[in-house]
Image: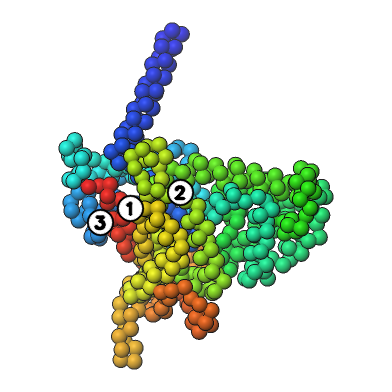
Amino acid sequence: MALISKSFFQKRGLDKLKNDLKGKANELLSRTMDQHVTLAVTGLSRSGKTAFITSLVNQLINEGNGTKLSFFDPVHNGNFIAAKRVPQKHFHVPRFDYDAAMSALTAEPAIWPEPTHGISELRLAIRYQPKNSILKYATDMATLTLDITDYPGEWLLDLPMLKQTYQEWSQQTHDLMNCAPRAQHSESFLDKLATIDPFASASEELLAELAQEYTALLHTFRYELGLSVIQPGRFILPGELAGAPILEFFPFPAIENLDANDYQNAPDDSLVGMLRARYLEYKEQVVRKFYQQHFLRFDRQIVLADCLTPLNKGKESFADLELAMSMILQSYSYGKSGLFSRLFSPKIDKLLFCATKADHVTPEQHAPMVALLNQLIHQNKQHLHYEAVQIKTLAIASVKSTNSGVSKYKGADVPVIQGQRLVQAKGKESTEVFGQKITLFPGAVPSQLPKDDYWQSNSFDFIAFAPLPGLNKQQCLPHVRMDQVLQFLLADKMI
């Protein structure tokens, strides 16, 4: 019996090894034949990542049952056959909860899905008929594997920390905290730090207390002031690290005035010694690990940006968005994805910037939205063009929440949108407080970065809307330009 059991388990082990090798061979073949795309989706809080991924998946698996993807060539030319969700490759990574998101959007009343707070994945298998590629000589039907990875843009803002010492990061953060609009809210915290001896022994309780106060400040900066540069990003979106001591540090503003030798020789149990140690541990165990385990394997990227909320918040908030976009884009490693680079060191070769919430303005304002986003990324975009990366900018609405039309005002036709107003609860990341159904012209979007005099003479009031009622799980969600998104990101892989 023992011999039979041993033989049985040996056979099972060999079968598992064969299956593993077969899986790796198939993946290698898919990459060789360009039949695999790893799409990374990111954006800062409230940019609409959850709605975007839900809509992208919904459009593909429901294509042909509702709105056609008119500008997606595989559908337009008859290549597209079908798409379905399949088990993801990385079992240790949380699955993107598509079903919960669709249930929220199709509820009565319809509500926006709960935002994701960490990394998640979803895999699609897309069947199509190859017509122009070499595959048409080998098969009548091919499968493109699409791995979608969702991760917070706030985590990207941590990548520049890899090149900074604790001293440099503290100085940079201190400078930001002393500028409007952060300064007023930071004053009490900075005054408290000024009374502390950096070389005195520090207790876990003191570090935890001050780190919690700093984290509360970051939440205020993000959710009340509408600011975008939040470091460390894991402090407001900790994921699986919630409550871990590695998130209990903060910038020490007086560090630039310390004697270099005293700072370098500070005992590990001193305040500055413990802060420095935790900062270094955060860089290595959180930031660098994310970069190595996830970031390096992406080969296509979409960056979602909500430009309307910072316009509402004012000059400082919009300038902060510009700085955040610059920090995000500097983190990427781009380059043309040839065969060998795809097999051994995949690099992002297509980059899509999307100005979200295009349905929150009237259609003729979409062109200014794109122009404004182009202005925000101008310097980095020039560098990326130099690196031969394909770049596109679009104004989109992943899930439409308004209808557009024309209304009469003093005898003249005025473009308007109509939808159910969604009232934002102060300081909260999401809300389900519904207002009345309204029809309005929400205002004009500037096509260039606003100057000081522009802020003085113009005010913005772009409001939030609830999803449209009556959405159906078995039909394509209403959208603005999701077909153009798919065309840019996937069409070249399905020819």
Foreground pick, 69 / 383: 383
Report, in whole angstroms, how far the alpha carbon at label 1 lies from the one at label 2. 18 Å
Residue 186 picture location, percent across and down: 69, 65
Q: Earlier in the sequence, mark 1 or mark 2?
A: 2
Q: Is residue 302 left or right of residue 310?
A: left
Q: Quadrant of residue 268?
A: top right
Classify residue 412 by image quadrant: bottom left
Query: Where is residue 114 drawn, in percent x and y?
Result: 47, 56
Name the disc covering residue 489, or none.
1
* Disc 1 residue type (three-letter): Leu
Crowd around label 3: few <14 · some 14–19 · many ≥20 (10 Å)? many
* Residue occupied by mark 3: 72
Badge 2 element: loop
* Foreground label between 1 and 2: 2
Tell me the amino acid under the disc marked 2.
Ser
- Which residue shows up at 46% across the image and 43% down it? 296
